[in-house]
Image (cartoon, rainbow, N blue to C red):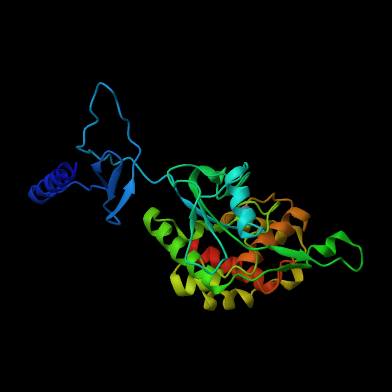
Amino acid sequence: MKNLSFLIVLTFFIITSCASQPPKIIKEVVRDTVVINKITERYESARIAKLDNYKISTSHYPAKGQDERIRFLVMHYTALDNEKSLNVLTQQEVSSHYLVPNDRTDSIFVLVDETKRSWHAGASYWKNVNNINFSSIGIEIVNFGYSTADPVSGDPDLAFTQRNFYDFPKNQIDKVAELAKDIIDRYNIEPVNVLAHSDVAPQRKHDPGPKFPWKELYTKHQIGAWYEDAQKNIFLGQFPYAEKDSTSFILSVQQDFEKYGYEIQKTGIWDTQTQKVITAFQYHFRPERYDGILDAETWAILKALILKYRS
Ligand SMILES: [Zn+2]
C-alpha cells in the first residue's frame, strides 16, 4: 500500500513535470480515502465509491466545474459548561463540527467530520443563501452566554438592552483563532462569510455575542471582515440626523443591511425585526453598545463595510 502510494505520487510528478501546459490540478487521489489538496498541499479525507466488481481509478481527472461546498464559517457559544456542551452537542438534535472547551488545555473536539453537515445554524440566511448548515462549518465555543438583570421598569423591551455577556478567556480565543484560520484557508472562505450565529439568524440568536473579539481576530489574524476607520469617519460626518426617522431613510438602511448580507423586511419603519438586525450587527461590529438603535456610528460602520466589501 505504501509502495502504491509512492508510485502514484511519483507518476503524478512525472506527468505534471513533462506536460508543457500542466493542467490546473486541484486535488490528487493518493489512496482511496485521502487526497492532497493542491492549493494548501495538505492531506484531506475523501469519500469515493468502493465497488465490489469494478475499480475506481486512482488516476484523477479533476473537472474545472467544481468548487467547495463550504462557503461559510459560523461561530457560536454553547451557553453551557464543558460537560453539558459535549453532551448536548453529541446526544441531541444539535451539533457542530468543532467544540472549543474553556478548560485551559490545548484540546479542541471534533464532533462532526468536515465532509458532513452538522446541525448548528437552524433556520438561517446570508446574502441570498438559506439553510447555512448545507454550506458551512460550525464552531461551538463553551461560554455561558449572558445573564439578564430583572428589568426595573417591568418593560420587556428594556430587558433587550440588559444582557450581560460573559468574557472569553484568552487561551480559548487563541484556539478559536488558529482553528478558524486553518478552516478559512483550506476552503478559501470570503471575509464577509465568517459570521456569528446572530448574523445568520438575527431574529432568534445572540451568539457568540458582543464579547467575542471580532476586531482582534481581524487585526491579529486576518480572520473575517472589518471596516476601515478612515472610511467610517467620512460616513460619520454624513449621517442625516434630520431625516433619521423618515420612511425613505429607514428603507435605505434596511436595503443596506440586506446588501451586506442580513435577512430583513423592507418595511420603512423602525420595527422589532429591524431592531434585532441592528443588534446583531452591533454585536459583531460595534460591541460597545448593542441597543438595536441605528445611531450615526452604527450607520457609518455599515456604510464603510459595504464600500469595502459589497461595492
Ligand atoms: Zn449558535
User: Ligand 1 is located in which of the four quadrants?
Assistant: bottom right
Residue at image x 74%, y 53%? Answer: 273
Q: Is residue 93 above or below residue 218?
A: above
User: Foreground residue, 35 or 232?
Assistant: 35
Quarter-wise, where is residue 238 in the image? Answer: bottom right
Residue 302: where, in percent of width, then height?
A: 60, 66
Would residue 154 appear left or right of 50 to someone viewing this image? right
The image shows residue 34 at horizontal and vertical percentages of: 29, 44
- Across and down, in percent, residue 162 comes to 79, 67
Q: Position of residue 272 (x, y in %)?
A: 77, 55
Q: Residue furthest top?
A: 53
* 53 sits left or right of 285 in the view: left
Which residue corresponds to the image point at 82% horizontal and 63% vertical from the top-left? 159
Residue visible at 49% across and 70% down?
A: 174
The reply, left or right, for residue 218 in relation to residue 302 is left
Residue in front for this viewpoint, 163 or 103:
103
